């Protein structure tokens, strides 16, 4: 199975900060990379699909980039509602896999 | 609200099996693969497997192969995930989710069930 490695595993930020989370695949996955946000007790919610395409209804402060094995999710100006856990996920192979998650906490 | 409706919480003993159901809303049953994802307490998301509701074909992660079975009942538009030989490590919230893609673009999960808590305890 393709391994997905996220970094960092946790991140402290203040409102208004710019933050970036990275995700590396163990082999090339082209642009078959999605980003999800999950809040406690809730199902995940897709933010970015196909590495850089913003899901409808998601604020434009979220952006994604990358291709091949290296990807990133950037929040241009963190808002209070953005404190959550973020996961990358590949849909390249028939067996999908997630990164281990990045918890964004308030500084 | 959840667009896929899952069955209720389960408590099982080690060695037993559990079967969780998932019914997508609307009239799209068969149009999209349904995947299962689980999350142990305080842990990350773990992909379990998928089923093609139209054909019944399925696939699962290596660690679940031989222990998980995914099926569907076309008459009631419902898919099922059965996990056998449960251990305490299988205690988790199990989600079903819809695999969607825009034409010409990769797949992603756009709709989720509300989650089913499975507790394995003696």
Image (tube, coloured by chain):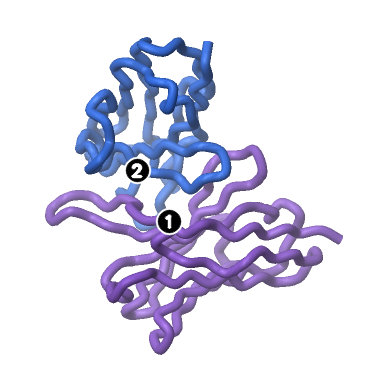
Q: Which residue is mark 1?
A: B1
Relative horizontal placement of residue B62, taking residue B87 as reference (left or right): left
- Left or right: B52, with B16 as reference point: left
Name the residue rendered at 78%, 68% in the picture: B15
Q: Quadrant of residue B32?
A: bottom left
Residue at image point 42% right, 36% down = A37
Query: What chain letter is assigned to the residue under label 1?
Result: B
Using the image as rendered, state which of residue B106 and residue A93 is in the foreground: B106
Neighbour class for label 2 at 10 Å: few (<14), some, many (≥20)? many
Q: Compared with residue A67, is residue B86 higher up or lower down, i.e. above or below?
A: below
The residue pinned by badge 2 equals A46
Side of A25 where B81 appears, left or right: right
Of badges 1 and 2, the one in the foreground is 1
The span from disc 1 to disc 2 (Cα, nearest Å) is 15 Å
Quarter-of-image position of residue A25: top left
Q: Is residue A31 visible?
A: yes
Nearest the eye: A54 or B85: A54
Give me the residue at 28% from left, 72% from top: B28
Q: Colour of chain B?
A: purple
- Which element carries disc 2, helix, strand or loop? strand
Query: B97 or A9, which lies in front?
Result: B97
Chain letter for blue, please.
A
């Amino acid at each position: 199975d393709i391994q997905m490695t996220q970094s960092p595993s946790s991140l402290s930020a203040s409102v208004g900060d710019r933050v970036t989370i990275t995700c590396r695949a163990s082999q090339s996955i082209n642009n078959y990379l999605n980003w999800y946000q999950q809040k406690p007790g809730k199902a995940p919610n897709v933010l970015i699909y196909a590495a850089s395409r913003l899901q409808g209804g998601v604020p434009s402060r979220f952006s994604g980039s990358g291709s091949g094995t290296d990807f990133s999710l950037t929040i241009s100006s963190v808002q209070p509602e953005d404190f959550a856990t973020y996961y990358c996920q590949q849909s390249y192979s028939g067996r999908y896999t997630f990164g281990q998650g990045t918890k964004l906490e308030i500084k | 609200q959840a667009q896929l409706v899952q069955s209720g919480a389960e408590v099982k003993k080690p060695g037993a099996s559990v079967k969780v159901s998932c019914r997508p809303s609307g009239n799209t049953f068969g149009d999209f693969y349904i995947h299962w994802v689980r999350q142990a307490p305080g842990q990350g998301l773990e992909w379990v497997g998928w089923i093609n509701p139209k054909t019944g074909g399925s696939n699962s992660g290596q660690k679940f192969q031989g222990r998980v079975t995914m099926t569907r009942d076309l008459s009631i538009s419902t898919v099922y995930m059965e996990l056998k030989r449960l251990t305490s490590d299988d205690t988790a919230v199990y989600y079903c989710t819809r695999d969607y893609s825009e034409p010409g673009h990769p797949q992603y999960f756009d709709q989720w069930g509300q989650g089913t808590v499975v507790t394995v305890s003696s």
